[in-house]
Amino acid sequence: MKASPQARPRFRDGLYRELLQEGVGYFFPSSRMEELGQVEPRGALLALVDRSGGTIEFEWIGIRYRLSKPAGHITAFERILLVSIGRVLATRYRLHDSLTPTAEVFHLFRGLPEDRYISAFLGELATPGSVRPVDGPDRITDVIEVLRASALGTYENRRIAMGALLFGPRLDP
């Protein structure tokens, strides 16, 4: 039996709401994210609505949420991280309807989602307000993957210490 056209978007919307909640829960473990109700979807999948009182209200795929921390305010870096999580998920969400061949965008679904969120966050800090292109490799995610793998290695029973220098999202001239 074939799924109705309305069932697929509802499933996808539910899946991406869950992915957002998991991403927020991972990076904001002490925070509280509460659902405030349905709203009319805007053009952007993630839209920050209100940043007052140390909390953030935002809309994600037709649902309004409030993110708050029990001790302290949401910082500017935490707002950027939230937007970065939304950008990564929004890019993936839109690719489901894209006519781009799968092989060209498959790299966006590879690896751990948390690595992609950090890559988007660091890219936003390097070039604020710009949306990085989805074509080509994501060097930051690749570096995180290599550092994670090498952190498990030892030499003569001692941990291997490694690091990386990142000079921004653009290719080195």
Image (cartoon, rainbow, N blue to C red):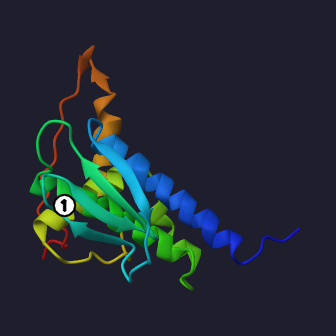
Graded by Cα atoms within 10 Å as few (under 14), some (14 to 19) or many (20 or more), the crowding at tag 1 reads some
Q: Which of 123 and 74 is in front in this view?
A: 74
- On screen, residue 156 versus residue 33, left or right, reads left
Q: Is residue 56 above or below residue 9?
A: above
Which residue does the image show at 30% across and 55% down from the upper left?
66
Q: Which residue lies furthest to the top in this view?
A: 157
- On screen, residue 164 versus residue 21, left or right, reads left
> Can residue 11 be seen at all in this image of the molecule?
yes
The N terminus lies in quadrant: bottom right
> Can residue 139 be seen at all in this image of the molecule?
no
* Residue 82 percent coordinates (x, y): 26, 58
* Residue 64 percent coordinates (x, y): 38, 64
The C terminus lies in quadrant: bottom left
- Tell me the SS state at disc 1: helix
Q: In which quarter of the image is residue 28?
A: top left
In the rendered image, which residue does mark 1 sit on?
80
Q: In which quarter of the image is residue 172?
A: bottom left
* Residue 169 percent coordinates (x, y): 19, 68
Which amino acid lies under the numbered mark 1 shown in the image of this protein?
A: Ile
Q: In this view, does 163 lie above or below 83?
A: above
Which residue does the image show at 18% across and 30% down from the upper left?
161
* Residue 15 percent coordinates (x, y): 55, 58
Which residue does the image show at 78% across and 70% down from the upper left?
3
- On screen, residue 147 versus residue 107, left or right, reads left
